[in-house]
Structure formats: structure tokens, C-alpha cells
Amino acid sequence: MDTPYDVPDKKIQFHPSDSPLRQGSYRGLAATANTFARESIMNDLAVDLKMDPLAFRLKNLKEQRMKDVLKAAAEKFGWPGNSIAPNHGVGIACGEEKGSYIATCVEVAVNPDSGVVKVVRAVAAFECGAIINPNHLENQISGSVIQGMGGALFEWIDFKEGKILNAHFSQYRVPRFGDCPKLDVVMLNRKDIPSLGAGETPILGIAPAIRNAIHNASGKKLYTLPLVPKGIHGKSADGLEQS
């Protein structure tokens, strides 16, 4: 829960809540939700201050490893780009868990008519110390990003009056091949640092990066996950009405 940013005055609290359903994180544990909340607010602060979201993060970070992944992701992505297409937006986010660091940049397209949100491209820069198996690590990072897109955009349990309305996989929306963006993975090999956890941390950046890109494209500030289970205008990610 602790913030990686250099904040002189901070108060961090955990507020439990009751749920009618069993719940738990499938990857990244509580860090996924905490990172989403923190990186969403960091983006809003940057916008309010009329600062570039990347520059605002770098200005408030002391940890060089976090700065390095941010800079690597931004460079590969071409952040923020001089010409962003109409109804497109870009977003950036970063996070730390189990001694590893992730930074993610995304570009989204928001259809103003249907409300459908499409992740067009993404860059994930990751550092977990010394890399032992590059191919395996790249697969872990890519899998984390795609899996995280589901929780970010449309995975949800739809229930009413004690009944689950989408209890079958045919009704439960998960990422499909058509949802996959152009994805670039940047791996920073720190041979001077012991190898650290790599299976969970890469998922942390994708949800807040998508959220911040949606804000950049549409002006909408979204604070709950999934972000657009029924699209920006209350429709599903396919553009079809959902119950």
C-alpha cells in the first residue's frame, strides 16, 4: 500500500468492506488495486497542475529503478507523441511489488458513438534484477498485460437479487485475440541485482494506464474497475447492450 513517491506528509489506511461474493486477486494480490488507485490520482494531480504525467511522476520519485522503467517505457512508446488522432488518448502508469518495477504506456481509441474502448498499442517496461530466462520473462510480462486488460476493461460479475447473471464463460467477458493491442515489451537487465519476482508485478501498470488514456481521450475520470464493462455509454465492449 505504501507509495513509491516522495511524499513528506502521508496517511495510509486500509478500509475493509463486506461483499456478498467471495473475492480475491488472481495476480498481483492487493497491489493491483492499490496501484490503480494511486496512479489514477497521480494522473489527475498532473492534469490539474497542467504538467505532463510522466514529468510529474519523475519529479516526485527518488527511486532510480522506478525512474528507469518509466523512461524506458516512454522512450519505446514515443511519449506522448506530437499527433494523437481524434478520440484517441495516451496514458502512463507505474508500480512496484516484490522488489520489481513496471511502467506501462498505452494508447486507446474511444468510439464516441458506440462508447467502445479499444486499446490500440501498449508498451511495458519491466525490471526484476538479473534476467535468467529472457523468453520466459517476456511471456510473463505479455501474459500479465493481456490478463490485466480484462480486469481493467470489462471482467465483472453481474448479479442481481442474489443471482449471478453471467455465470457461464459464454457470458463472462475476457480478453480475446481481437482485443490484443500492438504490444512492445522492454526488459531492463540489472545484472548487479539478484533476480526477483516476475510473475505478478507486470500486471500492475495496465489498468491505470488505460484509465488515464481514457481520461486523456474523453475527459472522463473513472475510479472503479472494470472501467467500461458496458462501454463509455453503458454498452458492452462489443457495442451490444448488456443486462
Image (tube, helix red, strand yellow):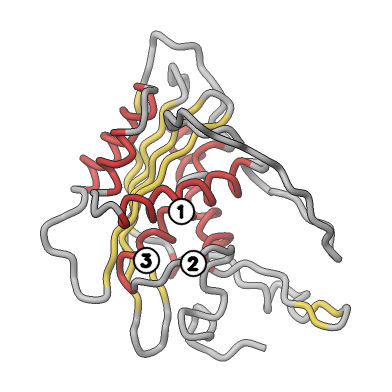
In the depicted structure, whether residue 224 falls above or below residue 172: above
Quarter of the view holding residue 196: top right
The answer to which of 114 and 35 lies nearer the viewer is 35
What amino acid is labelled 2 in the image?
Leu
Whole-Å distance between the Cαs marked 3 and 1? 10 Å
In the depicted structure, whether residue 17 falls above or below residue 202: below
- Lower position in the chain sequence, tag 3 or tag 2: 3
Q: Residue furthest left?
A: 82
The residue located at (49%, 67%) in the rendering is: 222
What amino acid is labelled 1 in the image?
Ser
The answer to which of 58 and 85 lies nearer the viewer is 58
In the depicted structure, whether residue 26 falls above or below residue 62: below
Q: How many marks?
A: 3
- Lower position in the chain sequence, tag 3 or tag 1: 1
Q: Are marks 2 and 1 in contact (CB under 8 Å)?
A: yes
What amino acid is labelled 3 in the image?
His
Name the residue carrying label 3.
Answer: 215
Q: Which mark is residue 158?
A: none
